[in-house]
Image (tube, helix red, strand yellow):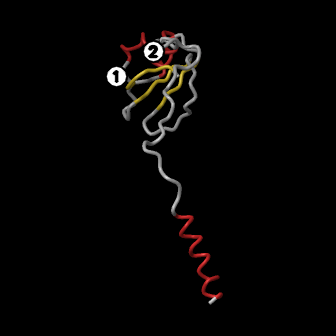
């Protein structure tokens, strides 16, 4: 009798562990996004000059266009992002991001 009782204890403990804690009524939500420090809310892409470069969207990125973007934006840095390419998510308001499509044409320009 003791043998059956002792062999059943691990099974009972295992089943009790599976019961878990009660679930909350609603799933926890992440905190709301905040504007990066040093950037006024709603300032958009003005910090790196991307707001003023809309006429370049749709054009092919070559060496001359790259130089023009760097000069016209006044951005301290420029990063070219191609489709499927991994890149860091660190935010640098003075950096111009040049997003390209599969044909090496400028899809959009943003700061960060």
- The quarter of the picture where residue 109 lies is top left
Name the residue carrying label 2.
44
- Where residue 74 appears, x then y in whole percent? 54, 10
- The quarter of the picture where residue 62 lies is top left
Up the image or down, 26 lies above or below 68; here it is: below
Q: Which image quadrant: the N terminus?
A: bottom right
User: What residue lies at 64% left-to-right and 82% top-to-bottom?
Assistant: 6
Question: Is 54 on the left-hand or right-hand side of 45?
Answer: left
Disc 2 versus disc 1: nearer the observer: 2
Instruction: Give residue 58's mark.
Output: 1
Local packing at callout 2 (Cα closer than 10 Å; few below 14, some 14-19, many 20+) is some
CA separation in Å, label 2 and label 1: 20 Å
Local packing at callout 1 (Cα closer than 10 Å; few below 14, some 14-19, many 20+) is some
User: What residue lies at 55% left-to-right and 66% top-to-bottom?
Assistant: 16
- Dot 2 falls on a residue whose secondary structure is loop
User: What residue lies at 61% left-to-right and 77% top-to-bottom?
Assistant: 9
Up the image or down, 25 lies above or below 7; here it is: above
Question: Is 42 on the left-hand or right-hand side of 36?
Answer: left
- Where residue 27 appears, x then y in whole percent? 45, 42
Up the image or down, 17 lies above or below 68; here it is: below
Counting labels gives 2
Up the image or down, 80 lies above or below 10; here it is: above
- Dot 1 falls on a residue whose secondary structure is loop
Q: Residue furthest left?
A: 58
Q: Toward the viewer: 40 or 95? A: 40
- The quarter of the picture where residue 36 lies is top right
Give yes or no for contact between labels 2 and 1 (Cβ–Cβ under 8 Å).
no
Q: Residue furthest bottom?
A: 1
- Where residue 112 appears, x then y in whole percent? 53, 22
Q: Toward the viewer: 49 or 20? A: 20
Q: Earlier in the sequence, mark 2 or mark 1?
A: 2
């Amino acid at each position: 009798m003791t043998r059956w009782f002792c062999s059943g204890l691990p099974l009972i403990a295992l089943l009790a562990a599976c019961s878990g804690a009660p679930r909350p009524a609603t799933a926890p939500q992440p905190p709301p996004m905040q504007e990066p420090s040093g950037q006024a809310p709603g300032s958009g892409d003005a910090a790196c000059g991307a707001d003023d470069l809309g006429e370049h969207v749709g054009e092919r990125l070559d060496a001359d266009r790259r130089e023009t973007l760097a000069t016209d934006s006044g951005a301290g840095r420029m990063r070219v992002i191609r489709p499927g390419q991994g890149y860091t998510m660190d935010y640098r308001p003075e950096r111009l991001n040049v997003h390209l499509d599969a044909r090496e044409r400028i899809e959009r320009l943003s700061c960060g």
